[in-house]
Image: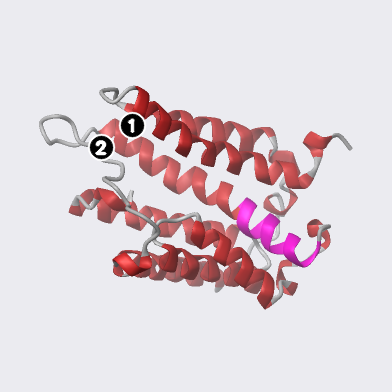
Amino acid sequence: MRPADHPAVARVVPFVIFIAFLPVGQALQSLLPDADLRWLYGVQVLLTGLALLLFWREYGELHVRAAAPMTDVPIAIFSGILVFVLWISLDYPIFRLGDAGAGFDPRLGDGNLDFALVSLRVAGAVLVVPVMEELFWRSFLARWIDRPGFLEHLPQRLSIRAVALSSIVFAVEHTLWVAGLLAGIVYAALYRHSGNLWIPILSHAVTNGVLAWWVVHTGNWQFW
């Protein structure tokens, strides 16, 4: 097996590409303080999406034809909305890691929305990020904590330790660490309960989609 064909590589590379743009964006902002770097998010999402497509054949659990029980779908949707409510309700200094900053503000100079930027942000948050993150945090890391040969480890057999540790690291990735911790637990619990990665992906997409709608309608750009 070539290194590029390893199932862990297929789940780690898209995540690393996405995360790498955070320091890159900060460095460019320092070098080019007057540049509009919001479009860099498009490059970030595009490269991450291309990496997912490149490794798509390695994501066997996303190719399973058996449908999830219909009861799991409304549970995933409800859980996604619940995480959204927790996310916007736990925005207190004690529950933050650092300063959230201004966030992603898609407005033009006249104060009107740039719908191209809004569409780009929503597409990335709903279509790319949930797939990329669930493949890394739940499909790979949570199972790997229990068993290095993680593909042989059924999601239903995830230990509480694996759920807790993967959720803690997931929390550290986010400024709102308490909300991130609870979100990680919810998505991992959905994966463990259903045994189907599409269920936490759906829930994650619902959270991000509802959050996007709320941010656009309230102007709380710091949540983006």
Q: State whether residue 1 is above or below residue 43.
A: below
Image quadrant for the N terminus?
Answer: top right
Query: Marks 1 and 2: CB-CB under 8 Å?
Result: yes
Mark found first going from the N terminus, 1 or 2: 1
- Give the number of the disc on residue 106: 2
Q: Percent from the top left, x then y, of residue 32?
A: 33, 22
Crowdedness near tag 2: few (<14), some (14–19) or many (≥20) residues, C-alpha within 10 Å: many
Q: Is residue 69 visible?
A: no
Q: Percent from the top left, x then y, of residue 146?
A: 76, 67
Residue 97 falls within the magenta-colored stretch: no
Residue 137 falls within the magenta-colored stretch: yes
Query: Which residue shows up at 40% across the image and 54% down it?
Result: 208
For marks 1 and 2, give the CA distance.
Answer: 8 Å
- Mark 2 residue element: loop
Numbered label tally: 2
- Give the number of the disc on residue 30: none
Q: Nearer the viewer, residue 187 or 127?
A: 187
Look at the magenta stretch and give its main secondary structure. Answer: helix
**Which quadrant of the structure image shows residue 152?**
bottom right
For residue 176, side relative to residue 75 (left or right): left
Q: Amino acid at mark 1?
A: Arg
Tag 1 residue: 38
- Mark 1 residue element: helix
Query: Which residue shows up at 56% across the image and 66% down it?
Result: 168
Q: Which residues are magenta?
A: 135-147
From the image, state whether disc 1 or disc 2 is nearer to you. Answer: 1
Query: Which residue shows up at 53% across the image and 65% down it?
Result: 184
Q: Residue furthest right?
A: 1
